[in-house]
Image (tube, coloured by chain):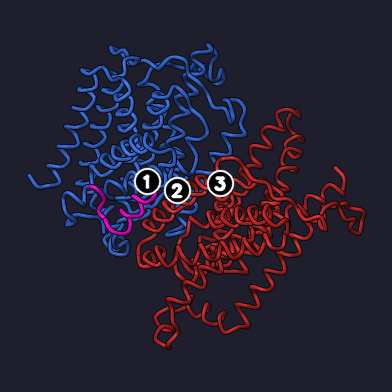
Amino acid sequence: MSALLIAEQVLNGLQFGVMLFLMAAGLTLIFGVMGLINLAHGSLYMIGAFAAAAVAGATGSFLLALLAALVAAALAGALVELAIIRRLYNKDHLDQVLATFALILIFSEGTRWLFGSFPLYLDTPDWLSGPVRLPGGVLYPAYRLALIVFGFAVAAGLWLLITRTRLGIKIRAGENDREMIAALGVDITRLYTLVFALGAGLAGLAGALVGAIQSVQVGMGEPVLILAFVVIVIGGIGSIGGALVAALLVGLTDTLGGIFLPEAFKLFMDPAKATTVGSAFASMAIYILMAAVLVWRPTGLFGARG
Amino acid sequence: MNREALFNTAVLALLVAVPTWALWADEPFTITLATRAVIFALAAVGLNIALGLGGLVSLGHAVYFGIGGYAMGILAHHAQSYTPLMEWPFLFEGTKSMPVIWLAAVLASALAALLIGLLSLRTAGVYFIMITLAFGQMAYFFTISWPAYGGEDGLSIYVRNGFPGLNTLVPIQFYGICLALLCVVLWLNWRLAKSPFGLALGAARQVPQRVETVGLDPMRLKLVALVISGAITGLAGALFADLNRFVSPTMFSWQMSGEIMIFIILGGVGRLFGPVAGAALYVLLEHLLGGINEHWQIFLGAALLFVVLFGRGGLVGLVAGREQAHD
């Protein structure tokens, strides 16, 4: 196994990780501020991807498609929050799980109704197609590299938003003591809608960005949703920094586990068997990681509350 | 007789009457639907012991359902191909006998519940929901990528397993077996809820600190509840596999876990017959709505939202009032 291959896989892991972060950041914000488990977050990811594919098909512009994904998902998020989600804040987790599970059914079937069962395709833009040569001689697709850069940029922007702006102060205050900030005159219902729309927009953006390297289809959100849950649970629910660390950890574990575990098993097994056993364990690696972290620290790496 | 007991009797009467009618009217498909409902009910009764009595929101009960299914699949697969399951340290052959398969399913899923419980009960709240979900996904991906028993394609069993003295290939006889098991488990559940263990478990759900003060270990109570719960859902999994004569990784999927939970919510959390009414209603809705419109899940989702937002007690709560509802 060459160093070039490893470098490429590390980049793949980072790319996967930052996309998971876009999903996980919204989930963890929504949980931290409103105390809501939102299983329907994957549907917002799907809505973003479908909006992007539709707009890209109509206009041919990738940037317009990204904008459409952001707007469509944020709008859908705000509408759902106003109509349904806000009735769930005071209910227990069981009700939240079920109501948002019901939303998944509605969104998935609704999208299938509108767009049919066949996957749509979203092309990467021309100006980002083809590989770039990185220092050290690694050839890496420009689009994936752009995803990594963009993901970190969004992470930095989110950090500035949370730590440096008035909205960020309100969000942090809302996480600590929602009665108190309501008493201080902050319109808490509007803040909730805003936070939900922000999380939804990030998920939609992730859906569109990933949709260009995979196919855009109904049900694409759920596998990512579960991984995003793994991320926020490992990072500690409510912690954005934790989500970033955990997202990169999960992305790297999943990508590198897929290559290294079969190789590792080959050291003491015959190669054919090692490949099957190794890939079986690789597909479970992140869940084993999560279980291990929770057994070690029951509220995640950076979590404070249960 | 209070209204809940009346409702329970009515549900039980329907579970007897509908298949009897179907037998008389020669509608074998209705019997298959009823069998499906009864097996789902059994799985949900299992989850209801953890969820309703113990307050453990496990989003990973598909693990036990799938383990039960694969216990049947693996044993029957070895029996139909005449290969032993293992030869060392002792000869262990496959089997086509239902009681043996049930025993294996119950033991295997109870063991899984014990291990998962020991690890996941360290966490609480959302973390518990998520760690059980993670164990479910672990099992799902493991079966997909493990080729020995079919991998992603699953395992087909050509002939339904046998039960001494009955012909299980006749739909109504297999239905009878499933219904009898459901009744036994419901009776167990009823006894359990009234037993000192059940009362202590209920107390551990409501105020764990007080349970601890009187010298009981809430963690151990919850662990035992989870093991019993997992074993029952595992038994349901073995029956489900026998109904379809097929097992596949979808039995482990997280949608399966969600569905088992939906049965309970539709019927009523913590109510003895809640899971039964919920599973029957679900299968009925699936059949009726599926016949009207291929996008029936939209209506299912809307119905579910309605129950969660406005009708907290589920079907049982609607009929029998809320006085005994889970808090």
Magenta residues: mostly which secondary structure? helix
Does residue B240 sit above or below B132 in this rendering? Answer: above
Q: What is the three-letter code of the residue carrying label 2?
A: Leu
Magenta span of residues: B301-315
Which of labels 2 and 3 is toward the front? Answer: 3
Q: Is residue B322 magenta?
A: no
Q: Is residue B119 visible?
A: no
Indicate the chain on which mark 3 is placed: A
Contact between marks 1 and 2 (CB within 8 A): the answer is yes
Q: What is the three-letter code of the residue carrying label 1?
A: Leu
Q: What is the three-letter code of the residue carrying label 3?
A: Phe
Q: Quadrant of residue B228?
A: top left
For the residue pair A295 and A253, the one nearer the viewer reads as A253
- Chain painted in red in the figure: A
Contact between marks 3 and 1 (CB within 8 A): the answer is no
Shown colour of chain B: blue
Tell me the residue that label 1 is attached to: B300
Label 3 – label 1 distance at C-alpha? 20 Å
Does residue A22 sit above or below A12 in this rendering? Answer: below
Indicate the secondary structure of the residue bearing disc 2.
helix
Image position of B161 (left or right of B190): right
Q: Position of residue B325 (x, y in %)?
A: 22, 55
Tell me the residue that label 2 is attached to: A105
Label 2 – label 3 distance at C-alpha? 15 Å
Indicate the chain on which mark 2 is placed: A
For the residue pair A202 and A269, the one nearer the viewer reads as A202
Q: Is residue B222 visible?
A: yes
Q: Position of residue B103 (x, y in %)?
A: 38, 26
